[in-house]
Image: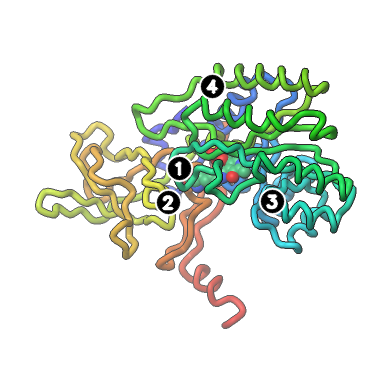
Amino acid sequence: MKIDSSQLIELAQKFGTPLYVYNGDMIEKRYNDLLNHITWPKLKILYAMKANYNPSVLKLIHQLGGSLDTVSPAEIILGKKAGFTSGNILYTANNMTDSEVNDVHASGVLLNIGSLSRLEKYGKRFPGSKVCLRFNPDVVAGAHKKIQTGGKLTKFGILLEDVGVVKKISETYDLKIVGLHEHTGSGIDDTNAVYKSIHNLLSIAGHRNFPNLEFIDFGGGFQVPFEPDEERIDYPKLGGEIGRIFKDYCVEYGKDLEMYFEPGKFIVAESGYMLVTVNTLKDNRGRLIAGTDSGFPQLIRPMFYDAYHHIVNLSNVNGNERNYDVCGNICETGDRFAEQRPISEIREGDILSIENAGAYCYAMGGVYNLRAMPAEVFIYKDDIKLARKRLTNEELVKNIIGECE
Ligand code: LLP
């Protein structure tokens, strides 16, 4: 399922580096894995498009039957252009403005509201409407403290103990609470944390509190192994257990509800590669430094979350390993994709592949230092296409000058 080194080198030569490459077959596999592992017939997968909003990725997920988790009005517009309809989009922005709430409501997309104050304003403005409510699961989990979403120290969701206030507000404005939601964090490798969050949300989700429920949404956060020796969670086991918990809940509720998940990383992380060329080698008194033609604005996860991304020297896969700092071309010391990482010997001109670059890599990118984001190539069933081109320097500058020219 991995794209082999020789094909990646060919793509780098054809399209130039830096270059993102996505493997649609891998995205399809991961989407189907989730469908197969989570044993609840009324399962809906809302792809968290913030992870990777490339239109080819979105179209594939639409073709596979997926729905969308969105967090901004522009995501809704783009999602609709990729084929998704309002009924298959959920809106989970936080700290929403009045005008965006009005626009999203008018577009027919269901809002997922995560604060008492917004719920009150929504009720006043749109009495009698349907709405989904985001609760804070009160569980702290996730691969890094910046991506742990649950617990009282974060800004997300309504506290579980405020369920009584929620009831009062929704009765006052005749709101139909059709869905309940929680999202615990990203890259959760502790299955007990997953069960605990589910239990916590379900503990307040009884028929007496919420008589109009159609679905429960347990967010995203499925772990993906990034390091070579990192184990993958036993997903069939996890999925089976979640199915059992939900079945018991639905029996008590008196109706088989839909179960939603909102995976981002799990669906797209492993599909992506960022290819860079090494153009400058240094030996700083024994410390080897490989300088490349990309930088942290084009793949920020190592610098931002200390994230590990495996790096392969495609041009010398069987060479003897040496330790390298793999650096970018940005004027900052922290501009490193890896520090003292064993990689097969690197020569100037070699092409490196930075792996698991399908989620939150291009999507978190920017043009700091005024270097345009890389092009993106999408491969699916042997079809290779340029899914977005790289702006030329002239185009980049034109975007910046815009109306002021
Ligand atoms: N649902 C909600 C409400 C979310 O906030 C997120 C991610 C997801 C679903 C999808 O989570 P996933 O399955 O991708 O873990 N930039 C970080 C990850 C931030 C996640 C933000 N919210 C990273 O690169 O690790």
- Depth check: give the residue in front, 275 or 370: 370
Give how far across and how far down residue 19 sits, in percent: 44, 50
Report the mark closest to the observer, 3 or 2: 3
Figure label count:
4
Report the mark closest to the observer, 1 or 4: 4
Amino acid carrying label 4: it is Tyr
Residue at numbered disc 3: 115
Q: Note whether residue 379 is visible.
A: no
Q: Secondary structure at mark 2?
A: loop
Residue, x 47% and y 40% (percent of image)? 272
Report the mark closest to the observer, 4 or 2: 4
> Disc 1 and disc 4: Cα gap in Å?
22 Å
Earlier in the chain: of badge 4 and badge 2, it is 4
- Depth check: give the residue in front, 104 or 387: 104
Q: Residues within 10 Å of mark 4 (few under 14, many from 20)?
A: some
Amino acid carrying label 2: it is Leu
Q: Secondary structure at mark 1?
A: loop
Residue, x 58% and y 51% (percent of image)? 155
Left or right of residue 107, residue 56 in this image: left
Give how far across and how far down residue 88 sits, in percent: 76, 40
Residue at numbered disc 2: 299
Residue 357: mark in rendering: 1
CB-based contact (under 8 Å), mark 1 and mark 2: yes
Earlier in the chain: of badge 4 and badge 3, it is 3
> Disc 4 and disc 2: Cα gap in Å?
28 Å
Q: Residues within 10 Å of mark 2 (few under 14, many from 20)?
A: many
Amino acid carrying label 3: it is Ser
Give how far across and how far down residue 230 sits, in percent: 38, 28
Left or right of residue 136, residue 1 in this image: left
Q: Quick one: which residue is furthest to the left in this view?
A: 285
